[in-house]
Amino acid sequence: MSQIHLLSPRLANQIAAGEVVERPASVVKELLENSLDAGATRLEVDVEQAGIKLIRIRDDGDGIEKDDLPLALSRHATSKIYELEDLEAVASLGFRGEALASISSVSRLTLTSRRICSEHAWQVQTEGRDMSAQLSPAAHPQGTTVEMRDLFFNTPARRKFLKTENTEFKHLEEVVKRLALSRFDVAFQLKHNGRVIHQLKPASVKAEQERRVAAVCGPAFVDQSLHVDMNAEASGLSLRGWIGLPTFSRSQADLQYFFVNGRMIRDKLVTHAVRQAYADVLFHGRHPAYVLYLELDPALVDVNVHPTKHEVRFREGRLVHDFIFRSIHRVIGEIRPDASNVPALQELTAVEATTEQKFDQQYMPLHQPREISGVNEQIAPYGQLHQNRSFSQPSSSGFSASPPVVSFESDEMAEVPPLGYAVAQLHGIYVLSQNKEGLVLVDMHAAHERIVYERLKLACEAEGVRSQPLLVPVSVALSVREADAAEEFDELFEKLGFELARMGEETIVIRQVPVTLAKANVEQLLRDVLSDMMMFGSSRRLEEHMNELLATMACHGAVRANRQLTLPEMNSLLRDMEATERSGQCNHGRPTWTQLSMGELDKLFMRGQ
């Protein structure tokens, strides 16, 4: 007796539903992607009980032919691909032809559609029990409406795994948010239990797109983000979108949206590249926020590697990783106290009367310090700075007092630099500065630490990596795959200051290491680097270890707390901050300065109320 037999269509579809239909949010995702593939410009999502009782999705797309309606509910029936070559360069969101069949096998499904050239609409109905489709005429405008009721009504065991209504709706809402971010040209409406939750209009220009991003991610993200727009013509890659400032980090990775050719994905290679780009500026344990769009040739990315299509495989993973890293790293590197690229300064405007009057603020002098290593003593030539060079000892209050006056003429306010001019030092820790917007507070140790650190990195890059031979070469036992990778990336290791030699099928000998890593655990470091290279095609672990040493040197070389600075030193520190990359954060990710506008200061004292 034969033990192998064909599964019934109903059972096969329910097995597929176990992969495709996990919860109501999965249904919404599949149906909305079908609508977008059909050219819809408006999508209406109406759900009851978080989609467990009802999911109704209406679009104004191309519609489905009458004869194709029953076929649309069959497994592996699709209009997206025809041949193997089509699968290797998929540009549509859906392509497997499993969604409608899987959904109809675990629910009561009604599909109504009208083609643009048809005079009448047609409707097909099916239930999970018998899977037989019933076709009938219907009244419907151009487009398609899919109505799904009683999810998992015929599989009660699956229904028990659903969470509370509130939890399920949050997952469903997140799906709508992701697709709304992927297609700015499409209008979205989401209703839950008869109440409108989201009403998003099409967004064509950048300002409208930012409003949609603010509606989905929150206004604070847009206010504290930088715009990314990078292209690599040689490789055909482009990256655009928004990345949050390092100070707008999150305790969890809940505000990270990455799209590849319009498809929302979560990929280890992408996450690793973004994380490395933030390595120097992100506080320990925090996560960056971003909404990014990567565009590339569909033939260079395989989207058919996961049932839910959340993961992809790049055919040139190393190229994509380096492009994402360098693009974000460059944008973050350009962050400096400048009104043209720091959102905090763009939105803080001073009171008009303030910019028209003469400023005469009494300066409380400070104790004469010793020379500070790493700070340029020359005063930047901005405005008029009057000072008395005799200094008194600091008072017990943390201030020093004396007659000097800092004065700005009204016609010079337009030339005041972003961080303004120093007026005092507070408790030997903070520099107080006056700029056009109001008051700037600077953590002098954190700011100077970043300046020294960036200078050390530039000096190391200019000198190149210096290596030293090991007195006793280190023998490392590896797997054959790891040893092969070490040979493959031999030239890269040589540029990084390592000399490796293969002594056997599973043995690598380290003969030479970078000088800065002479005391490090080179064996473990080699294993970590090889692991990264095999997974992502590249590694920055060596550079990160070197940077950790430079950061420690910068921390010890930076000006310490309770060190009293002169006005020339404080102003020189401010000018260096304005010229230094990533000067908004110290080496550990803490902010180095903050701005209080005149409006905010007025509120503290209820002025004008």
Image (cartoon, helix red, strand yellow):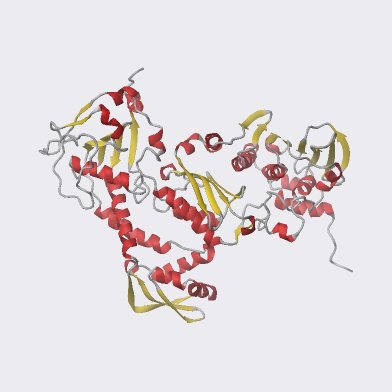
Q: Position of residue 350 (x, y in %)?
A: 34, 27
State whether residue 490 is above or below residue 283: below
Instruction: In the displayed orientation, state which residue is furthest to the bottom.
Output: 504
Q: Image quarter for residue 192? A: top right
Instruction: In the displayed orientation, state which residue is furthest to the top.
Output: 609
Q: In this view of the protein, can residue 56 be seen by the observer?
A: no
**397 lies left or right of 592:** left
Q: Position of residue 25 (x, y in %)?
A: 67, 43
Q: Position of residue 147 (x, y in %)?
A: 77, 37
**70 lies left or right of 94:** right
Between 70 and 65, the one nearer to me in the picture: 65
Between 8 and 294, the one nearer to me in the picture: 294
Q: Position of residue 9 (x, y in %)?
A: 84, 53
- Quadrant in which the N terminus appears: bottom right
**183 lies left or right of 603:** right
Q: Image quarter for residue 31? A: top right
**209 lies left or right of 128:** left
Residue at 80% from the left image edge and 42% from the top image edge: 64
Q: In this view of the protein, can residue 295 be seen by the observer?
A: yes
Residue at 84% from the left image edge and 45% from the top image edge: 68
Q: Image quarter for residue 384? A: top left
Tally the marks: 0
- Quadrant in which the C terminus appears: top left
State whether residue 505 is above or below residue 515: below
Between 36 and 340, the one nearer to me in the picture: 340
